[in-house]
Image (tube, rainbow, N blue to C red):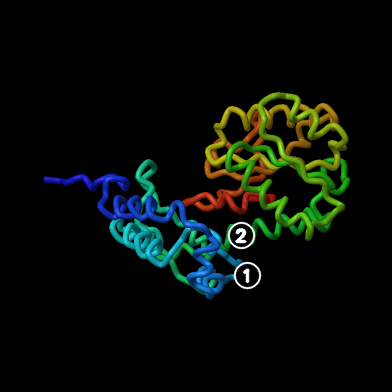
Amino acid sequence: MATTSPSLTQRPAWQALNEHFQQVRTLHLRQLFNDDPRRGERFTLDAVGIYLDYSKNRTTDETLRLLLQLAESAGLRGRIDAMFRGDKINITEQRAVLHVALRAPRDESIVVDGEDVVPQVHAVLDRMANFSNRVRSGEWKGYTGKRIRNIVNIGIGGSDLGPHMAYDALRHYSDRNLTCRFVSNIDGTDFVEATLDLDPAETLFIVSSKTFTTLETLTNARSARAWCVNALGSVEAVAKHFVAVSTNTKEVRLGHRPLAHDRHWSRTVPRDARGLPCHG
């Protein structure tokens, strides 16, 4: 008969951590640093260019021991290994969660269902990079022959927050000849304000939706299509001013006009790459 594992907060390791919290909650950081002059060195981590200093928290060696004990009790190591193995840990969609494959070097191998998926990932990333470079260089032009100078991402949730965050973080290194905007609110004011000072002939829309059925995203995409077609005078303009990022290739179209698209990668959605134009 199958048994159900206790919830995290019902585990003895959690109870031990909670008792420890009651003991340290009133400790002053001054006391912790007086007791351990090397605390500022020991309670830090430095890796891949990121420096983490957690010494200025009510954390002790016992705190770390109890946290590791809780992680072991919950089987965290096994769950991490299952993700890296390609086990179908996404139980709602019965699929692997292979975000690690999206960051894997070309020479690494990650086998899922007997197939090395890393080459598939890099094939998509290469197409994305190629198209992005074509936009930045001016090789990809709009319907009237003008080069693209404005990029508007249309999405919601992770399809908006992911590229927006990446853009903000890397803006210092960006080409300032390109204007980037983001539309996520179904209120028409959001779209109007985002495009108010843009030339439709120089604007590329990235419609980002995993299923391409999200109501808010499609509503804004249709508004963008109408704005573009009305200004440029032809539905043929859609093919030059819209690209899509989606796993549902059958639905990637606006008003029966298919868009340039990329299948992402069939096993998982590279949300961290959604800020890049894609072309199939």
Q: Amino acid at mark 2?
A: Leu
Q: Amino acid at mark 1?
A: Gly
Q: Residue 192: where, in percent of width, then height?
A: 79, 28
Q: Check the image and report above or below for 162 versus 105.
A: above
Q: Which residue is mark 2?
A: 125
Element carrying mark 1: loop
Badge 2: few (under 14), some or many (20 or more) residues near its Cα, within 10 Å?
A: many
Q: Residue 252: where, in percent of width, then height?
A: 60, 38
Q: Residue 259: where, in percent of width, then height?
A: 66, 40
Q: Residue 272: where, in percent of width, then height?
A: 59, 53
Q: Residue furthest left?
A: 1
Task: Please identify the quadrant where the N terminus is shown.
Answer: top left
Whether residue 85 is visible here, answered yes or no, is no
Tell me which residue sits at (60%, 49%) in the image: 262
Depth check, mark 2 against mark 1: the one in front is 1
Dot placed on the residue nearer the N-terminal end, 2 or 1: 1
